[in-house]
Image (spheres, rainbow, N blue to C red):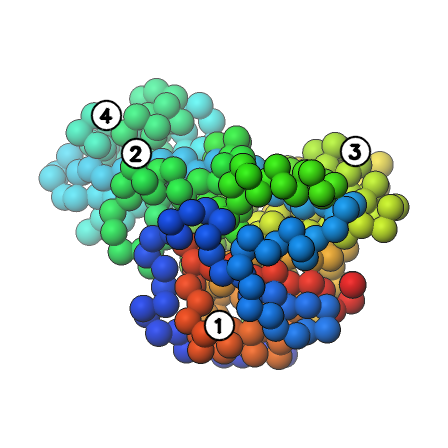
């Protein structure tokens, strides 16, 4: 990492009214800001995406599924608590963020969703180890709510249960959606397949840490939150085939980038592996040399966030600064339910 990078270099002014509180009426109804390989900006619609792709390109999607990870309840003493499951660790246990007037100690029982008790058994750094009375996933599905990001101000509704989930989600485990994928509907996927655009899947279970602010000015001191990822042998074969045939690898979302680049790092250490999986703390900042990704479809990211740093690494810091200033001026909609951006790496055309 460039040891001179400072947090303040990744700030921008965003009028609060540009933070999208609800999704576009149609999934593919968003705008699309296109940064071409010469770093020029083009205002487009998401439905223009097929014209920016070509036969032989490979779209890589993150197939994680958002779980209903938020539970409200009370301590036995009566105090209110909010539990946000960060990661399911076994059939009956999970790591969770717990909001309460006082941090619960090991042995504390919490009554959640007016339905069941859980027991706090310990801590791992900022997270609590929580034991559930039954299958964690089943209890969350029955009693939890969709964990909308902190900047979305309404409580999750049935509409959010559908729209804060990609149409291809299949591996439960995320507490935040891979939001670039929210723009795709079945018609768009079918259209791309007809064009000869290939698709492959990775799994990265997005954690609540994706919304955590960076708290150090010198970025070399920042420690990334860990997220679980998996890149299958079939996906790695598709990547190799795409490269051999001269196609581009287009990551759908920053989480797909992190999964692919984490796999590249793992395979560099263990080149005989046919697949890659594990926990990743990969922190991509300007100066990073991308191994797998030629282009990126993404949403607009929070000021001073690790995701803004990642897109700046791909497109260039000055280009992203210019693109975001243009997006604010042109009234694009920001963050999870907002508009999209298609970035072609300046090193590839």
Label 3: which secondary element: loop
Marks 4/2 in contact by CB < 8 Å: the verdict is no
Q: Residue at x 29, y 37 (%)?
A: 158
Which is more foreground, mark 1 or mark 3? 1
Which is more foreground, mark 3 or mark 4? 3
Relative image position of residue 315 (x, y in whole percent) = 66, 69
Q: Nearer the viewer, residue 210 or 316?
A: 316
Marks 1/3 in contact by CB < 8 Å: the verdict is no
The residue wearing badge 4 is 116
The residue wearing badge 2 is 144
Mark 4 surroundings: few (<14), some (14-19) or many (≥20) residues within 10 A: some
Q: Which mark is residue 327?
A: 1
Relative image position of residue 89 (x, y in whole percent) = 47, 32
Q: Which mark is residue 220?
A: none
Q: Nearer the viewer, residue 165 or 134?
A: 165
The residue wearing badge 3 is 274
Lower position in the chain sequence, tag 3 or tag 4 = 4
């Amino acid at each position: 990492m460039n040891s001179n990078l400072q947090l303040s270099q990744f700030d921008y002014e965003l009028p609060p009214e540009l933070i999208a509180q609800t999704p576009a009426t149609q999934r593919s109804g968003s705008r699309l800001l296109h940064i071409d390989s010469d770093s020029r900006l083009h205002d487009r619609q998401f439905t223009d995406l097929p014209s920016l792709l070509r036969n032989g390109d490979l779209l890589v999607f993150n197939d994680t599924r958002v779980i209903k990870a938020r539970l409200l309840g009370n301590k036995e003493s009566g105090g209110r608590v909010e539990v946000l499951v960060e990661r399911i660790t076994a059939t009956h246990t999970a790591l969770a963020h717990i909001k309460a007037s006082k941090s619960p100690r090991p042995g504390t029982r919490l009554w959640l969703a007016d339905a069941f008790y859980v027991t706090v058994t310990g801590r791992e750094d900022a997270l609590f180890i929580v034991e559930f009375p039954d299958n964690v996933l089943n209890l969350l599905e029955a009693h939890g709510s969709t964990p909308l990001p902190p900047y979305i101000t309404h409580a999750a509704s049935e509409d959010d249960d559908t729209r804060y989930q990609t149409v291809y989600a299949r591996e439960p485990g995320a507490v935040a959606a891979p939001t670039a994928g929210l723009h795709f509907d079945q018609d768009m996927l079918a259209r791309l397949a007809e064009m000869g655009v290939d698709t492959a899947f990775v799994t990265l279970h997005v954690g609540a840490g994706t919304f955590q602010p960076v708290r150090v000015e010198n970025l070399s001191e920042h420690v990334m939150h860990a997220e679980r990822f998996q890149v299958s042998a079939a996906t790695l074969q598709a990547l190799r085939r795409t490269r051999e045939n001269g196609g581009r690898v287009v990551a759908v979302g920053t989480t797909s980038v992190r999964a692919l680049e984490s796999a590249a790092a793992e395979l560099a250490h263990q080149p005989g592996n046919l697949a890659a999986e594990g926990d990743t703390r990969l922190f991509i900042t300007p100066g990073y040399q991308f191994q797998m990704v030629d282009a990126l479809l993404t949403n607009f990211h929070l000021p001073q966030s690790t995701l803004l740093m990642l897109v700046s690494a791909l497109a260039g810091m000055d280009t992203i600064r210019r693109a975001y200033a243009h997006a604010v001026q042109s009234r694009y909609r920001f963050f999870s339910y907002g508009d999209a951006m298609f970035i072609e790496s300046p090193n590839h055309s």
